[in-house]
Amino acid sequence: MTFDIEWAPDVVIGRRYKRLQVAPAPPTIRLADPSDVDAIVAMHERCTARSLSYRYLSGTFRPTPAQLAQLVSPAQGCSLVAVDTCVIAVANLVGQGSCAEAAILVEDSWQGRGIGTAMMRHLFDVAPQHGIDGVELHLDAGNTPALRLIRKMSRQIDGEPQWSFDGPIITFSFTTTRPRTPPGD
């Protein structure tokens, strides 16, 4: 986003203008609720087939509004949304017992800006509040941005994740109960 900002007049040159890059405010990340379902459906419609495939691990799967409503209000766990002027990302933490599956979908035009990383950190932060001490992520082996995210998360959580392959799918398992102590503490 670029704005022209007028500077004070200069007596020799007249008026000067300087082009400045203005960083927009970061999106707000908050708990999702049932009133967000329509906005989440609209966000899914703005996502490419590739992004949906990486999120749902299926070539043609586009969840129905009813399925998205179930993800927004899981029996155990939670969902988060990132909101700018509309919902631009959704993260789900769906649990059973003390373990949960985490997944994130960021609208294509917002990818590569750290939103997925911020949402994953929030999921790990809220997991213990939902009785969850283990988080699993199932990723397509070709999803390079998600693999970079796993690398970042493993530096922030005490211990490396366990992982396994099932064809093109990699499953990473993290323990969330032991946050890594920052250096110097």
Image: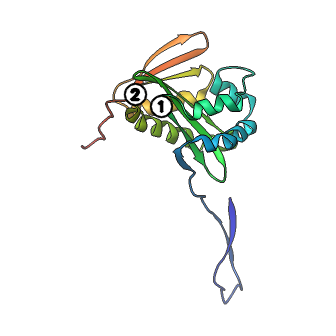
* Quadrant in which the N terminus is drawn: bottom right
Which numbered disc flags the more N-terminal residue, 2 or 1? Answer: 1
x and y, in percent, of residue 159 in the image: 35, 25
Measuring 47% from the left and 36% from the top, which residue is drawn there? 123
Q: Is residue 124 left or right of residue 181?
A: right
Measuring 69% from the left and 20% from the top, which residue is drawn there? 58
Question: In which quadrant of the rendered view does residue 182 lie?
Answer: top left
Q: Residue furthest left?
A: 185
Say if 38 sits above or below 13 in the image.
Answer: above
Query: Quick one: 14 or 143, which is closer to the camera?
Result: 143
Say if 35 sits above or below 124 in the image.
Answer: below
Look at label 2 and name its amino acid. Ile
Measuring 61% from the left and 58% from the top, which residue is drawn there? 24
Identify the residue position indicated by label 2 in the image.
132
Measuring 51% from the left and 32% from the top, which residue is drawn there? 149
Look at label 1 and name its amino acid. Gly
Element carrying mark 1: strand
Identify the residue position indicated by label 1 in the image.
77
CB-based contact (under 8 Å), mark 2 and mark 1: yes
At label 2, counting other C-alpha atoms closer than 10 Å, the crowd grade (few under 14, some 14-19, many 20 or more) is many
